Image: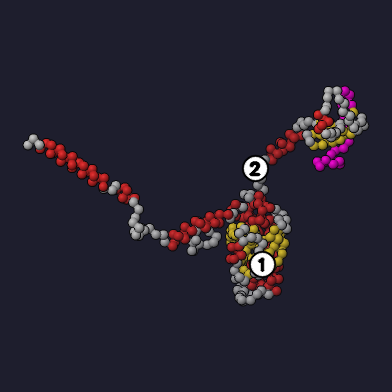
Amino acid sequence: MADEPQDDDAVAAEWEAMANQGEADQPDEFESASAAPAPGAKPTRILNQDEIDSLLGFEGDGDGDKDRSGIRAIINSALVAYERLPMLDIVFDRLVRLLTTSLRNFTSDNVEVSLDSITSIRFGDYLNSIPLPAIISVFRAEEWDNYGLIMVDSSLIYSIVDVLLGGRRGTAAMRIEGRPYTTIERNLVERMVAVVLQDMSAAFEPLSPVKFLYDRIETNPRFATIARPANAAIMVRLRIDMEDRGGKLEMLLPYATLEPVRELLLQMFMGEKFGRDSIWENHLATQLWSTEVDIQAVLDEQVMPLSEVMRFEVGKTIMLNATPDSSIMLRCGDIDVVTGKMGRSGVNVAVRVDKVLRKSGGLS
C-alpha cells in the first residue's frame, strides 16, 4: 500500500505527457482555414464573359462615344476630352445658327440644322468608321496653317442633289447604291461645302480670325489622310433635315489644327482674361513714368590687350580719341539710349541730345 502514491504520480505524469502530445499534433483552426487547396481541387469562383469584358473595357452594347473603363480606358488615356475646351460649344452653337440660315438660302427650302455631338476620337479610328460611299472634303485653315475634314454621308448627298435639281417636296430622295458619284453630284456637294466653310469662318471670327479654304474632294478615306492615325481630333456631327429628306455632316478638326487657338478655346466665356487685372496694369504703367534710372555718359571706349592693362601704374596717362566737339553716348545699363554734345549749363556739365537710338542700336 505504501507504493500506491508513487504509482498515482507516475500515471498522472504519463497522462499529462500524452495530452500535450495530442495538442501538438492537432492543426490550428486558422492555419487549416488558410491552407492552400489541393492541386486537384476545383476553384470556387470563375469570372464569366461579361465580367471579363467589363474588366478589359470592351462593352458589347456600348457606344463608341461613351466613357471607357478598364484596360481600354488606360489605352485611350492620351486622348484629350473636348470638355477641356469649353469655347468649342459656343463656336459650334453659333455655327448651327449661321448654317441654318445659309442652307435655307442655298436650297430655298425649309432646312433645320442640329448639333448631334462633339466627341474626341483618334484620326485613324475615324477614317475606319466612315460609312461608304461618302464624299470627304479636305479644307485648310489658312491662318492656322493646317487642315481639317468635312464628311457628307450618302443620304445628305442625294437629298442635296434632289433639292437643288427641283425634286418634289414630301418624297424621300432616291438612293442608288453601288456606283461612284457623278460629276454633277460632286459639284453640288462642293458648293454646299463652300457654304459650310464660309459659316465656319464666321463662327470662329469672334474668337480668332481664320479663313477656311476648300482644298479638294476625296471619295476614298485613305486619300484624305491629314494626320497620323494615332493623333487625337475633335469630331463634330451635325444633322441636316429638309422636311422628309436629310442626312449627316461630320467635321473633323485635329488637335494640331486647333493648337494655335488652344488658349482661347480654354476660356469659359468670350473675352475671359485668365487673371489679368486692368487696374493693376494701368497703375504699373503710370508708375513706370516716375521710375528713376541711372544714365552713364560715355566719352570714349578703347579696346586693348589684357597684358597692357596689367602694366597700368599710378600716374600713367590714357589718351582718348575724343575732342570737345565729339559726340558722346548716353547709356542705361547695357542699352544705348541717345547721343549728344557735351557742354556746360551754369556750374553743371550738360549733354544736348542730338539723335535718339532705336532698340536695335541703329541711329534714327
Report the front residue among 66 and 325.
325
On whether residue 349 falls in the magenta region, the answer is: yes
Q: Position of residue 188 (x, y in %)?
A: 69, 70
Q: Is residue 306 above or below residue 46?
A: above
**Range drawn in magenta:** 344-364
Residue 235, horizontal then vertical, whole percent: 61, 60
Of badges 1 and 2, nearer the viewer stands 1
Q: Is 235 on the left-hand or right-hand side of 44?
A: right
* Residue furthest left in the image: 1
Q: Amino acid at mark 1?
A: Phe
| Image quadrant in which the C terminus is located | top right
Q: Is residue 219 above or below residue 306?
A: below
Q: Residue at x 26, y 47 (%)?
A: 25
Number of labelled discs? Answer: 2
Q: Which circle's residue, 1 or 2, is located before the other in the chain?
A: 1
In depth, the one of 10 and 37 nearer the eye is 10
Residue behind mark 1: 223
Q: Residue 203 location in percent, x, y? A: 68, 57
Residue ID for mark 2: 275
